Image (cartoon, rainbow, N blue to C red):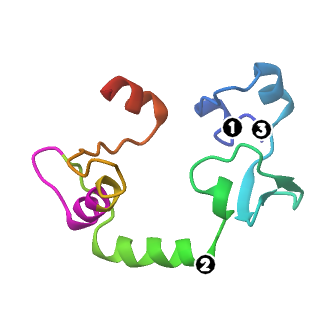
Amino acid sequence: MNQGDGADRIWHPYTRFSALRDGVPVIVRGEGPGCSDEGGRRYIDTVSSWWCCHLGHGHPRLVEAIRRQSAVLQQSILGNLSHRPALDLASALANLMPDAARHVHFTSDGSCAVEAA
């Protein structure tokens, strides 16, 4: 990654500026527990963000579920409206609780969950 290829236009959190000067790997593909960069070098994904921690990159069942859902509805905010996948998941999660009268609040990350709580 070099200046002029977009590297000077993106903020890389948790990254030393000196690493950016030297160049960081540009990941182009994820498969199973690892990723590959533009040069073909493989890395084990130890960040474990989102579902990759449990299922790995490119898990066929997850890819198919994303494909099916995105053909119907890719995103819809829950402000003043709702959608069936959110309603169904909220009911299923609430029914796992000792008191099924619980409410579910969906967030995209831990900071949002803490703020909402």
Magenta stretch: give its range. 79-91
Crowding around mark 2 (Cα neighbors within 10 Å: few <14, some 14 to 19, many 20+) is: few
Give the class, few, some or many, for how many residues have Cα within 10 Å of label 1's Cα (few <14, many ≥20): few
Q: Amino acid at mark 3?
A: Asn
Asked if the magenta segment contains residue 88, the reply would be: yes
- Whichever of callouts 3 and 2 sits on the residue coming sooner in the sequence is 3
Expressed as whole percent of the image width and height from the top left, the position of residue 76 reads: 24, 55
Please name the residue that numbered disc 2 is placed on: 60
- Closest to the camera, between mark 2 and mark 1, is 2
Residue name at image x 31 percent, y 28 percent: 116
* Residue 12 drawn at (x, y percent): 65, 31
Q: Position of residue 34 (x, y in %)?
A: 79, 59
Q: Secondary structure at mark 3?
A: loop
> Which quadrant does the N terminus fall into?
top right
C-alpha gap between disc 3 and disc 1:
6 Å
Q: Is residue 68 above or below residue 56?
A: below
Residue designated by label 1: 4
Query: Which badge, 2 or 1, is on the more N-terminal residue?
Result: 1
Q: Which residue is mark 3?
A: 2
Q: CA distance from mark 2 to mark 1?
A: 36 Å
**Residue 61 lies in magenta, yes or no?**
no
Residue 47 drawn above or below residue 82: above
